[in-house]
Amino acid sequence: MSDAVIVATDLVAAVSRLLQVTLDFTLEIKKKDMEPILAAIRPKINALIALKAENDIEACINLYIRATKYLKEPEKVLTELKNLSEIVKENKTDNPLLRLRILTNIFNSSVSYAELRYETLLHVIEYAGNTDNLSLISKQLDSVDSMVDSQLIASRDHRRRLNLAIANVLDTKEDKKVRVLIFLEKYLQTFPKDQELKSAREHAVRAIRLFLKNTIPSFISGIDLTSLPAIQALETDPEHGKLYQLFQIFASQGWKEYDSFSSTEDKTFFEPNGLSKTMCEATIRLVTLCSLQPGFAEIPFAIIADKLGVHDDQVEEWVVKAITSNLITAKIDQVRCTVIILKTQRHGFAPQQWKDLQTTLRLYKKNVGSLIEMAQNARKASLHVSSAH
């Protein structure tokens, strides 16, 4: 007995038993003609899923999926699996966990059909989000590119749809905002300079707003939107130019630039963008501490106070906040009223940061040169002593 006959026989028997109906496809099974069998069972899928015997139902529908592979034309296999996916995902309240597993099974069984596998993956992601089951697939989202055909995911359009779908699903969860930004960054990366930037405008604005509301975790996660053409295009946008200006301040500048900007803007700018002036002030002060040059030089409280726009006696509080936020590693000398910045979560390079880096490199070059000279002198002295003996 062939595998096709076994699968068809088991499928008809399972549906008959679960739904307590009599299905007779003896002739079709004998001919290995799957099409009329699947056509008769397809309208019963929702009735099957509504039953309580989840394991039996899942096994039955897995037989249905296997049976599609014995259709005589590849196009009919694709059509049948697409129809099954549509039936399964259309209901979001009736046994959603089972429906999600069925969609996953369709995905796993469609390795030979790249486009179908990609579309089913989108169904799985969206269905999990729509039914509050995102936690079941959350870990897999970080490696989602590897789940679809490499040539397919190389297409900008396919990457866009996938990354935007993930961002939208994650955005329904308050604790996932930084991950939303990670996938929005991937989405916006698919828009090269001068190409289709207008269609990216809405999500570029969305990304900037998310960044401004989650600046510190964005820094820590290594998110960098500054180089993206879709983001840069907002600089000259008549509606969102000021939002872009604020973004640049947070990404690569500091308190003084923010203070100058905010002095000309009121709540009519901040509130429509979902921003709080108080929160922005606190965040930009922490971000400003990241712009301080790391090394072993002691920085007086007075200099830091000037950079943060605070009094000297408030410096320690802000430095501690930056340390506990994992933005900087620093040592505070309360007696000498100085701070040594050992390490920072470097944000975008503004002109001053490039100057600081150049100074550090020059100092490093000078110190290395001195060490080499010392080593050469010590070697000459050693050779001189040896020859004297």
Image (cartoon, rainbow, N blue to C red):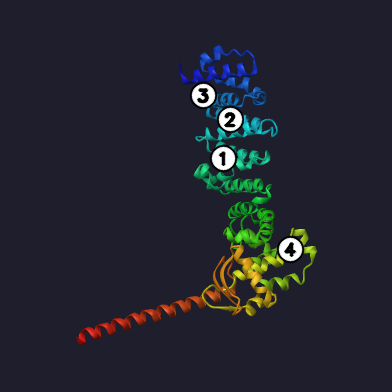
What distance separates the C-alpha of mark 2 from that of mark 3?
A: 12 Å
Q: Amino acid at mark 2?
A: Leu
Residue marked by disc 2: 81
Q: Residue at x 59, y 33 (%)?
A: 101
Residue marked by disc 1: 118
What distance separates the C-alpha of mark 1 from that of mark 2?
A: 13 Å
> Which x, y percent locates residue 270?
76, 63
- Where, quadrant-wise, is the C terminus in this rendering? bottom left
Which badge, 3 or 4, comes first in the chain's sequence?
A: 3
Q: Amino acid at mark 4?
A: Pro
What distance separates the C-alpha of mark 1 from that of mark 4?
A: 38 Å
Q: Residue at x 77, y 63 (%)?
A: 269
What distance separates the C-alpha of mark 1 from that of mark 3?
A: 22 Å
What distance separates the C-alpha of mark 3 from that of mark 4?
A: 58 Å
Q: Secondary structure at mark 3?
A: loop
Which badge, 1 or 2, comes first in the chain's sequence?
A: 2
> Which x, y percent locates residue 116?
56, 36
Q: Secondary structure at mark 4?
A: loop
Which badge, 1 or 4, comes first in the chain's sequence?
A: 1
How packed is label 1: few (under 14 Cα within 10 Å), some, or many (20 or more)?
many
Residue marked by disc 3: 70
Q: Secondary structure at mark 1?
A: helix
- Where, quadrant-wise, is the N terminus in this rendering? top left
> Which x, y percent locates residue 296?
51, 75
In the rendering, which numbered label is found on residue 303?
Answer: none
Label 1 close to label 2 by CB (< 8 Å)? no
Q: What number of labels is visible?
A: 4
How packed is label 3: few (under 14 Cα within 10 Å), some, or many (20 or more)?
many
Q: Secondary structure at mark 2?
A: helix
Q: Amino acid at mark 3?
A: Tyr
Residue marked by disc 4: 238
How packed is label 4: few (under 14 Cα within 10 Å), some, or many (20 or more)?
few
